C-alpha cells in the first residue's frame, strides 16, 4: 500500500523536526522505533503525554507500562490482551497493545484469569481497603526519605552514635528508594484498575448484544451517580466557598484576583480572615496536591504551587452562592435516572437467567467503579506531586555543588544519568576534590532544553502504522476510546468528512449550543466564561472546577471511562470525547453544537 493510500504514516516515514537532530539521545535505546514496528499499529498517547518528554520525565511512561503489562500479562492473565509497549519519536509517546489471537492460548489464559480475577472480585472491598492502607504507607515512606545535605563535615551524631556510615552513602540509598517508590506506586495503581475496566467492558458487551440499539453513554449512565473520592478536592473548594460566606469574607475574592493579594487582605481582616486561612491550610494537605496536569510532567505543578487555579474556582463558587445558585452536582437526579434506565432495560430481558447475569455484571460494575476514578488522586496527584517535590531536593544538591545551573535542570537528565551525577558528587565530597560534573553536564543540558523547546513545534499524527482489524484491550477502549470506529473517523479524508462536523464518543447525553473556548492546559481554566463550551485535548481531575461553569465539553482524546466522560455525566451536561482533533479544528469564539446523544460536534460559525 502506498503512502497516499494509507490512513496513517509508518513509523519509518517520520522525520526529525529540523533543528532537533539528536533528540533521541535524551531517551533510552529501547524507546526508538525499529524496522519491524512498521507492521504494528501505534497511537499517540496525548491523553497522558500531550507535550514532548523531558529526559527524566520519560520514567513516567516507562514505569507505568511496566506495571500495567505485569498485571495484564503475568499476574491476572487477561485472555485477549497482553501489555502495552511504547516508543518515542520527536519527543512524543506512541503506544500499542499486543493482542492474543490464538484461540487455544485465549482459552488457557481465560482459565487462569477467572481464578485470579475472581479472587479479587469476591474480596474487592477488603482488598481495596488494604490497598488504601498500602498507599498511605507508601506516601508516608516517601515523605520520610531524607536527602543528605553533604555539609563540610558530617554530623557529630555519626560519631556519637557510632553509625559507621557517612552521609554520602545515603545519597545513593535515598535516590534509589525514591525511584523504587515510584515503581511500587504504579504497581499499586494497576493492581485493581485493569480489573475495573475489564468488568465494565464485559457488562458493556453484554448490553450491546442484549440491546442492539443501546448507545454507549446509556450503558455508562447505569453506573453514574456513584460517589467517588476523586470529586473530593472540588468539594473542598466548595466547602471553603461556603465558609467564606459564613465568615463574611467573600467580598475579598474576585475572579482573576491574585491569591497573594487575597491572602494578604484576609490576614488584615482579623479573626474572620484568620479563621478562613486556617481552614485553607488544613485543606491544602492533601486536597491541594492536585497536579495541573495528570501527574506525568515535572513542570505541571500542583494547586499548592500555584493557588490561582483553586482560588479562581472558590471565587466562582462564592459568586454562585451569593446569587442563590446551587453549586451541588445533581447526584440525586443522576441516581434516579440511573435506576430508571436500569429498570427499563432489565425489563426487556427475556429470561431469569439473562436478568440474573445482568444483575451480577451490573452489581460488579457498581462495586469496582469507584476505583476507576479514585486511584487517580492517590497515585497521579497526591503521591506524584510529593515525588516530584522530593526529586527537587536531589536537584538542589546537584545545583549546590555546581553540577547543574538550576534545580529544574535536574529533570533534563535521564534518571540513570541523575544517579551517576549524584554518585559523582558523593565521591567528590568524600575525596575533597571538585565534581567533574561541573564541566560535563551544563552544556549537555543547555542543548537538551533547546531541543525540547523546539520539539513543541511538531504536530504529531494521531496514529502510525496499519489500522488493526480489532481492538481487544479494555484500557484502549474504555480510557482512550480507541476502537475500530474511532480510527475510521480519524482516518476519514477531508474530502469525505463534513468540514463543519467532528465525530467522537457520545459520552454524556443532551444537546448544547454555545461559544467555544479552546484550552490546552488546566492552567488556563481561569479564561473560561459562564456558559461557554470547553474544547480541550483531554481533561484530568484538576479540571474539576471548570465543570461548574460550562455548558458542554469536547475533547480530542477519551473513551467511555475517561475523566471528561465521567465528570460530564456527573454534572449532567452533554459531552463528546475522542474526536481526534477538536482543538485543531475549532477556535475560541466559534459557536458550536455539542450533541452528546450522537457524538457529533457541529461548528456553526
Image (cartoon, grey):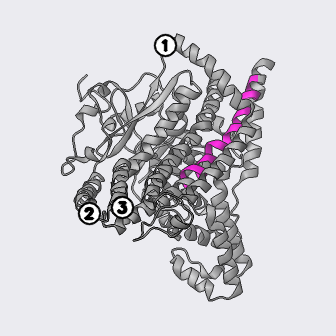
In the image, 381: left or right of 411? right
Residue that mark 2 sits on? 438
Q: Nearer the viewer, residue 221 or 36?
A: 36
Q: Are marks 1 and 3 in contact (CB under 8 Å)?
A: no
Could you give the CA–CA distance between mark 1 and mark 3, rounded to whole angstroms?
58 Å
Label disc, if present, on residue 430 of the rendered structure: 3
Count every numbered label the image shows and give the total. 3
Q: Answer with left or right where residue 280 lies relative to residue 153.
A: right
CA distance for labels 3 and 2 = 16 Å
Do labels 3 and 2 touch, CB within 8 Å? no
Along the polypeptide, which appears first: circle 3 or circle 2? 3
Q: For numbered disc 3, what is the local secondary structure?
A: helix
The quarter of the picture where the C terminus appears is bottom left
Give the dominant element type of the magenta stretch: helix, strand or loop. helix
Q: Quadrant of residue 588?
A: bottom left
Q: Is residue 258 visible?
A: yes
Q: Quadrant of residue 490?
A: top left
- In the image, 147 versus 347, the foreground residue is 147
Vertically, is 46 above or below 342? Answer: below
Under circle 2, the secondary element is helix
Q: Residues within 10 Å of mark 3 (few under 14, many from 20)?
A: few
Q: Which residues make up the magenta segment?
A: 357-381
Give percent across and percent down for residue 199.
65, 31
Task: Decide if residue 375 is on the left or right side of residue 325.
Answer: left
**Residue 365 magenta:** yes
Say which residue appears at 30% left-offset and 33% top-offset: 33
Question: Which residue is identified by label 1?
Answer: 102
Q: Considering the numbered disc 1 on the image, is that residue within a helix, a strand or a loop?
A: loop
Amino acid at each position: 500500500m502506498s503512502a497516499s493510500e494509507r490512513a496513517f504514516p509508518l513509523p519509518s516515514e517520520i522525520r526529525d523536526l529540523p533543528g532537533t537532530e539528536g533528540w533521541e539521545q535524551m531517551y533510552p535505546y529501547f524507546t526508538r522505533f525499529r524496522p519491524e514496528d512498521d507492521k504494528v499499529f501505534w497511537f499517540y498517547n496525548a491523553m497522558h503525554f500531550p507535550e514532548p518528554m523531558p529526559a527524566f520525565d520519560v520514567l513516567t511512561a516507562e514505569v507505568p507500562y511496566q506495571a500495567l503489562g505485569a498485571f495484564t500479562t503475568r499476574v491476572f492473565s487477561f485472555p485477549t490482551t497482553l501489555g502495552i509497549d511504547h516508543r518515542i519519536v520527536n519527543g512524543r509517546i506512541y503506544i500499542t497493545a499486543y493482542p492474543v489471537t490464538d484461540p487455544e492460548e485465549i482459552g488457557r489464559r481465560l482459565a487462569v484469569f477467572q481464578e485470579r480475577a475472581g479472587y479479587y472480585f469476591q474480596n474487592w472491598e477488603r482488598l481495596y481497603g488494604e490497598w488504601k492502607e498500602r498507599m498511605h504507607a507508601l506516601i508516608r515512606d516517601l515523605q520520610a526519605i531524607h536527602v543528605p545535605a553533604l555539609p563540610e563535615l558530617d554530623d557529630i551524631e555519626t560519631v556519637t552514635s557510632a553509625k559507621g556510615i557517612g552521609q554520602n552513602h545515603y545519597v545513593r540509598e535515598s535516590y534509589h528508594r525514591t525511584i523504587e517508590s515510584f515503581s511500587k506506586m504504579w504497581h499499586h495503581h494497576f493492581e485493581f484498575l485493569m480489573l475495573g475496566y475489564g468488568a465494565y467492558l464485559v457488562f458493556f458487551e453484554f448490553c450491546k448484544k442484549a440491546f442492539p440499539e443501546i448507545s454507549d453513554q446509556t450503558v455508562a449512565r447505569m453506573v453514574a451517580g456513584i460517589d467517588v473520592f476523586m470529586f473530593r478536592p472540588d468539594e473542598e473548594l466548595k466547602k471553603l466557598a461556603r465558609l467564606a460566606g459564613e465568615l463574611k469574607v467573600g467580598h475579598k475574592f474576585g475572579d482573576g484576583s491574585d491569591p497573594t493579594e487575597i491572602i494578604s487582605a484576609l490576614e488584615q481582616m482579623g479573626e474572620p480572615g484568620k479563621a478562613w486561612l486556617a481552614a485553607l491550610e488544613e485543606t491544602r494537605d492533601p486536597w491541594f496536591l492536585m497536579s495541573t496536569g495528570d501527574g506525568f510532567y515535572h513542570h505541571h505543578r500542583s494547586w499548592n504551587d500555584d493557588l490561582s487555579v483553586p482560588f479562581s474556582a472558590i471565587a466562582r463558587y462564592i459568586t454562585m452562592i451569593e446569587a442563590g445558585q446551587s453549586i451541588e452536582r445533581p447526584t440525586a437526579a443522576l441516581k434516579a435516572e440511573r435506576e430508571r434506565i436500569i429498570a427499563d432495560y432489565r425489563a426487556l430481558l427475556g429470561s431469569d437467567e439473562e436478568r440474573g447475569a445482568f444483575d451480577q455484571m451490573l452489581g460488579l460494575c457498581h462495586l469496582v467503579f469507584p476505583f476507576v476514578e479514585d486511584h487517580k488522586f492517590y497515585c497521579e496527584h497526591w503521591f506524584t506531586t510529593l515525588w516530584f517535590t522530593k526529586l527537587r531536593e536531589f536537584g538542589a544538591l546537584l545545583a549546590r555543588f555546581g553540577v547543574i545551573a538550576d534545580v529544574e535542570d535536574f529533570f533534563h537528565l535521564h534518571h540513570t544519568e541523575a544517579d551517576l551525577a549524584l554518585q559523582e558528587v558523593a565521591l567528590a565530597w568524600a575525596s575533597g576534590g571538585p565534581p567533574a560534573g561541573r564541566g560535563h553536564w551544563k552544556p549537555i543540558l543547555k542543548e537538551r532544553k533547546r531541543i525540547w523547546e523546539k520539539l513543541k513545534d511538531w504536530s504529531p499524527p494521531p496514529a502510525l502504522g496499519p489500522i488493526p482489524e480489532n481492538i481487544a484491550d479494555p484500557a484502549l477502549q474504555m480510557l482512550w476510546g480507541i476502537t475500530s470506529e474511532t480510527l475510521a473517523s480519524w482516518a476519514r479524508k477531508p474530502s469525505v468528512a463534513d468540514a463543519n462536523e467532528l465525530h467522537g464518543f457520545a459520552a454524556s447525553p443532551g444537546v448544547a449550543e454555545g461559544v467555544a473556548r479552546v484550552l490546552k492546559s488546566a492552567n488556563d481554566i481561569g479564561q473560561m466564561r459562564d456558559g461557554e463550551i470547553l474544547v480541550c485535548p483531554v481533561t484530568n481531575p484538576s479540571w474539576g472546577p471548570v465543570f461548574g461553569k460550562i455548558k458542554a465539553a469536547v475533547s480530542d482524546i477519551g473513551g467511555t471511562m475517561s475523566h471528561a466522560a465521567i465528570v460530564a455525566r456527573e454534572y449532567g451536561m452533554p459531552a463528546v470525547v475522542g474526536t481526534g482533533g477538536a482543538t485543531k479544528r475549532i477556535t475560541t469564539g466559534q459557536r458550536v453544537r455539542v450533541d452528546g446523544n450522537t457524538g457529533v460536534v457541529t461548528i456553526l460559525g
